[in-house]
Image: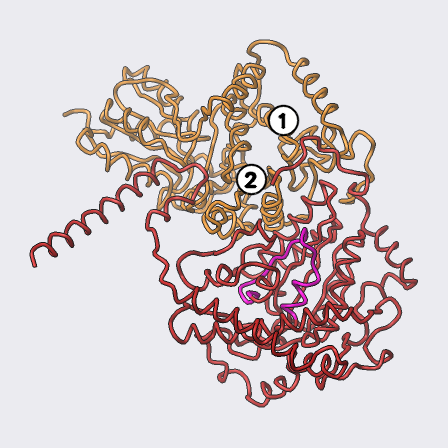
Amino acid sequence: MTISADHTAPDTTSTEPAGNALTEAVKKFGITVEDYMLPARHQIQMVDPDGRLIPEGEQGTQPGHEYPVPGDKELLAAYEQLVVGRRVNDQNSALVRQGRMAVYPSSHGQEACQVAAALCLSDADWMFPTYRDAVAVMTRGVDPVQVMTIFRGDWHGGYDPLENKVGIQCTPLTTQLLHAVGVAHAAKLRGEDTVVLAMCGDGATSEGDFHEALNFAAVFHLPVIFFVQNNKYAISVPLAHQSVAPSLAHKAVGYGMAGERVDGNDVVALLAVLDRAVKLAREGSGPLLVEANTYRMQAHTNADDDTRYRENSEVAEWRAKDPVNRMRTYLTDRGLLDDDGEARIREHAEAVAAQLREGLSEDVPVDPQELFRHVFDRQTPQLAEESAMLADELARDAAATDSQEAGK
Amino acid sequence: MSPTITTSSEANGNVSAATARAAASAAASAEAAGPQPVTMAKALNTALADAMHADSSVLVFGEDVGMLGGVFRITDGLTATFGEQRCFDTPLAESGIVGMAVGMAINGMRPVIEMQFDAFAYPAFEQIVSHVAKMHNRTKGAVRLPLVIRIPYGGGIGGVEHHCDSSESYYAHTAGLKVYTPATVADGYRMLREAIDSDDPVIFMEPKKMYWTKDQVDLGELRRLHAEGTTTGHTSEGRAAVARPGTDATLIAYGPSVPTALAAAEAAALEGRSLEVIDVRTIVPFDDATVCESVRKTGRAVVIAEAHGFASVSSEIVARVQERCFHYLAAPIRRVTGFDVPYPAPKLEKYYLPGVDRILDAVDDLQWEN
């Protein structure tokens, strides 16, 4: 990525007191600063678990927290990605059971969050995902097999972050939120209107980097959307052990940014809230925190046993709130989806699943010399020495095998 | 101080490149020609300013680096010259500083960030070890992190707790980080410019007790040589220096221990012993060739470092030299390092730090009678 040699950023990027920008946002909505920053009294929900559009007065909105229903085209695209995402989650879990993947932290049940996180962004924006956000990364446009390479076990990453503007799927919790802040800061200094969406879970909000990232974004007044998928568990530890805040969205106030909570299994509400968050951030209203209330339907990974820490009845309760079924009913009832449309979408999902089965069943040969190739931009003599040592070891192994073969 | 100060027209970061270049040439012409007494602090400050003039993607940030110019004044005047967008204070959070620098480097910038003191860098350890060191490898070079983390380190200033650690071994032990540490004023300029130019992340360890050390240095000449080096590709990386030639034994030192080693060599000369002093300069990558050439010549070696000896850079140097020079050695390699105790309170540090006498004792032990 190159930047202009003349570092003449436009006036809009000059450092300005965050308070002034908040005042502007307040003017825009005609409410107090506190009412702008505090989440609405109720979570935003537009389509209920049975797939019915909730009457406008009962969606949880209030003055300054109003959200129009997204357009039909966006909703249909979201539904298609939901179906694909669900299929991918289940296909990958199967591939883990077959030993084709080392591990897969499934987002089964959280697909609405995954899809909305990707669809709310423009091409020039950035996304910083966690290890559980493979479906979001894929929805953003990264090749599915490349996305899953990290879980296949031949390298610690499979895609070029710069190509689709997606950070590497990050394992150390919330460390990537600061990278999001830095990407947004660099863009702002160059006068670009890039928005960055930074993802984390409920347990991760306990980490120090969560605090540092939100504070930096607020102080430097950066267009970052912190998107917290509250799926109720950090492996086995429930949310009550992480935080006693009224909600995770309420944490925004302490940083001087706006927070909102939304039904994380309602892709309509998610898109409405995130679309507006992206628009506000792009217009210069500073960072925002969005908490999606969702549920991790499956164990943390295949190595985890969730029956040790939660009741089946709780899981069943959430199954009734499934994001995919809800959207199918809603779109069908509105006449936007018929059997043909559904069949076409299923076909798309099957094609992606087949691509994954094929791509991940392939035994990709690993090159041991690759170990030394990427540590530095300029290789050190020490690494060159170690690389030669391994090459020699492998050559002797190969020669020994050859002579054994010859002796047979 | 509010982090969002209203900016003046000179200092709002919208300074045009032409204005910046004019300021650069003004600064350069204000320098007296030829070698002058220059402090390490001034050399580092000049290197930062020159790098910022040369490349608009170079940014400086950290704690107190803006208006104040850093607690050691290394960033003095940068905000005034380049504006608050190029040199600025951050909230007081080291992980945040490093993490944000990672993001900026991903997005085309070359951040040069300051950790205020060695031990204040520890909150950033996760960002450094898990991301700064690994991003290039994880993405097979697709994402480079051309960032420099400047860390004032070492003791000898009578500092209170957490202000005198020698933390270089943590970074040197981490694959994917380059670790530079200058021991002369000229190297302060030269190596910081090279660190900023490097596409690899560099941990730049500044011996804080040497900030006010003066050498006769021609900054204009260094600037010219740097420009020349960027075209020829010549760098200091992986090149140790023979700080003082000698024939009887080799003292291997880096950063703050180099002047101590030179003083020991001076004292030994009075006793008729000729000691060669090697200044390691870049701990990673390490210059095996220069170090081993010296040890093969002298047959004896002492490694000197302020850091604790156990599992340290000094133990690594001993191991490397022993593996490569065993048959040339007349005596086991000795080490003079800090004791394996937490860095002591000011009134006790003189007992802890490697000094001339302790070095000469170690040299005396190198089995001369045979």
**Picture layout, residue A137 above or below residue A9:** below
Residue B27 quadrant: top right
Query: Residue A386 location, x and y as percent?
Result: 30, 43
Q: Which chain is red?
A: A
Q: Position of B149 compared to B80: left or right? A: left
> CB atoms at circles 1 and 2 under 8 Å apart?
no
> Which secondary structure, mark 1?
helix
Up-down relation of residue B18 to residue A352 (above or below):
above
State left or right for residue B148 relative to residue A99. right
Query: Looking at the picture, which amino acid does disc 2 mark?
Result: Leu
Identity of the residue drawn at 72% across and 63% down:
A289
Amino acid type at mark 1: Ala
Q: Between A314 and B335, which is closer to the camera in this rendering?
A: A314
The residue where tag 1 is placed is B54
Residue range corresponding to the magenta coloring? A113-134
- Residue carrying label 2: B147
User: Horizontal and vertical percent for residue B366?
Assistant: 23, 29
